[in-house]
Amino acid sequence: MSYIALALPLAGLIVEGVNLLAGSSGPSLVEIGFTVHQERPRTGWYAAIRARKDMLDINTLRVDPHDYRLLHDNGSPLADYPYLVVEMTQARARDDWFKVPELAQAYGSVQEEFRRGSVTGTEEAIAAFRRIALTNNDLLSVDAERLVAQVQDRYAELGPPVPPHRRRRSRQYMFPDFRSLDLFGGA
């Protein structure tokens, strides 16, 4: 759900791509869409079909697990109506947490300031990262707090950054890759 906001800017490109594939030059190809508000979203398959209720028995439809097309009970594809299929899933841990743009960008600022050798800049970037992580809608509060603690712990382990002209080859002067943080503690 949290990445829907990221996908919205791409919607126009997707529509344009579908139109180009279908040989259409206008917006007439996209025929359906839907919007849903659920207080407590439920997992499962959802379909928006442009058909009157009396024309199609949705209880006889299923989703093909290979290509996600809607199929009739007899296995034939639903071909007479435009439709959109969406699957809602739930996971305890988000494997791609490090790709959340706002977090990745803030962490990149921490890395950049550390690389530059700026103590003040690094500490300000860590403070900014903390604010962004703790207010980010893509993380649960407990996960955001754990992530901030890990960034602060890494900084404490590495020590303050060293300006480039004072560095020695035997020491690491890079803040670790964002993906290397163990957000879920091995879960």
Image (spheres, rainbow, N blue to C red):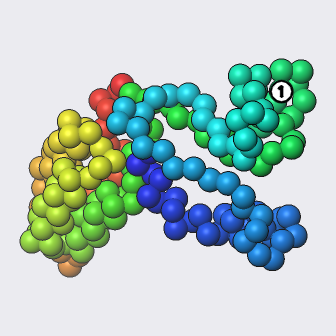
Q: Quadrant of residue 73?
A: top right
Give the residue displayed 89% in from the left and 21% down from the top: 74
Q: In this view, does 88 lie above or below 126?
A: above
Where does residue 119 sit, x and y in percent of width and height? 11, 69
The residue lying at 46 percent from left, 59 percent from top is: 6
Residue located at (65% from left, 43% from top): 48
Left or right of 175 in this view: 67: right
> What residue is rendered at 29% in x and 60% in y?
107
Is residue 83 in sight in this rendering?
no
Looking at the picture, which amino acid does disc 1 mark? His
Q: Is residue 169 left or right of residue 90?
A: left
Q: Where is residue 19 in the image (x, y as percent from the top left)?
A: 78, 68
**Image mark count:** 1
Report the residue that reaches farthest toward the front. 54
Q: Mark 1 points at which residue?
A: 72
| Relative depth, front residue between 50 and 95 | 50
- Residue 41, x across and y down, in percent: 42, 33
User: How far across and how far down the image is residue 58, in percent?
Assistant: 72, 28
* Image: 140 above or below 6: above
